Amino acid sequence: MFRKILIANRGEIAVRVIRACRELGIASVAVHSTADEEALHVKLADESVCIGPPPARQSYLNMPALLSAAEITNADAVHPGYGFLAESAHFAELCHRAGLTFIGPQPELMRLLGDKVAARAAMAERGLPVLPGSGLLTSDEEAMAVAARIGLPLIIKAVAGGGGRGMKMVRDIGQLCAQLATARKEAEAAFGDGGVYLERLLEAPRHIEVQVLGDGCGRCVAVGERECSIQRRHQKLVEEAPAPALSAEEREDLLGRAAQAVAALHYRGVGTLEFLLERDEQGRARLYFMEMNPRIQVEHTVTEMVTGLDLVREQICVAAGAEVAVLAGRAPIVCRGHSIEVRINAEDPVTFAPSPGCIRALHLPGGPGIRVDTHIYAGYSVPPHYDSLLCKLVVHDEDRPAAVRRLRRALHELVIEGPQTNLDLHRRIVDHPDFIAGRLDTRLLERLAS
Ligand code: MV4
């Protein structure tokens, strides 16, 4: 097992990883920018190293500074969390070259999955259904030919994208070339790669994702699925497990196929496969693979609540080559009850602009079936330089109606004074008849906003 892990991240996920390290008897090294001297992850870790000024480019994304911090503290592994360098195959390679274990998948697989066209092809080859679409587009003529073959409406996506950023819809063939040009420009600006591809557009899909864990030697388990259909600008706001939209047979089929495809890749570590769900005229579920994220995700907590697993611990164990009971077939994965997570952000409730500042008062909910993952504390000042996630409120109960009641109760108890937050939006969501009935879709948020 590792002796010491450097956590190349901040916020609640850095705290989450430090907790897993302490339980495993592994020392932890926090890194921080000068804006994060008072951050909770710095206080909770065994050691800390300042890696640069506030802008992420110069600190949390600064590879030489991170590698130097690992060297001077004599760490033997690096945990990237999510965001920042979590999906950088280049950083993973630099870690390995420096004699550090990068706690994540093999760099070649990170590179494959970072190319959304290659990932689609790889998963289709291994038996996962994908939407009709194109490869990397090389000309407008090719795009017109693909549009003629698969029909309208279409969606243009960035090969280097992910999380839905830089998507453009095409409902009228006359718009195709103009939308392509816009999409290419936006993709180039956002990712430094203007490559785009086409997919048939689903008008009102639900977003279902599958959590997997692989040992890198051809064994893989699907730990469970989550539904994340309530999103705003591709930022998830509410996530739950199990997915209310799937029957037991549909879930079993989805998990089985996902595990098989990922096992065939010899994937190592935790990962998430994103699917879109629609139902055909007969009501049969159609699930289409979209992309796979080679990292621990924000919403891993709901899967932990229903399975009782510690996914960060399993992730560390797999990276260390240690035995993991669920992969060795020595422990069945059981899904018990229902879990819902809401993301509380520091943001203006009207404009959604970030709202940093001092946490003047804080009261966190407690009692049965409640988990709060957060890095904030009373007196802490939320810096303006990073994402606006303040806290993840996660509830668990015996079934979905009970979990919704528990969530409503927990949202009633939670007090955060100082920054503006989206707490009221969450209180309106849990009271909405469509949410209570499990009818989740993007339009729910639009109806609430107006
Ligand atoms: C789509 C889609 C419709 N058709 N792809 C991709 C990443 C994820 N954040 C949203 N993505 C979508 N991809 C095709 N071919 C619609 C979305 C989408 C979405 C899907 C489920 C739930 C909420 C959504 C919000 C915006 C866009």
Image (tube, grey):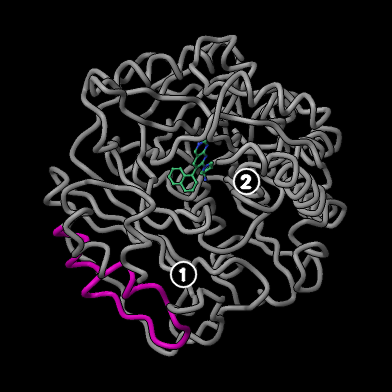
Instruction: Give the residue at mark 2.
Output: 167
Residue 20 x/y as whole percent: 48, 47
Q: Amino acid at mark 1?
A: Asn
**Tag 1: Cα neighbours inside 10 Å, few (<14), some, or many (≥20)?**
many
Determine the CA span between mark 1 and mark 2. Answer: 24 Å
Instruction: Give the residue at mark 1.
Output: 345
For residue 310, say whether it is visible.
no
In the visual, does 433 lie left or right of 226? left
Q: Is residue 239 above or below residue 129?
A: below
Q: Quadrant of the N terminus?
A: top right
Label of residue 202 in the image:
none
Identify which residue is drawn at 83% across, 51% down.
63
- Classify mark 2: helix, strand or loop: loop
Sequence order check: which comes first, mark 1 or mark 2?
2
In the visual, does 123 lie left or right of 178? left
- Is 418 included in the stretch rendered in magenta? yes
Q: Quadrant of the C terminus?
A: bottom left
The part of the image, by quadrant, that contains residue 50 is bottom right
For label 2, being within 8 Å of ligand 1 is answered yes
Identify which residue is drawn at 26% across, 69% down.
428
Q: Main secondary structure of the magenta part?
A: helix
Q: Amino acid at mark 2?
A: Met
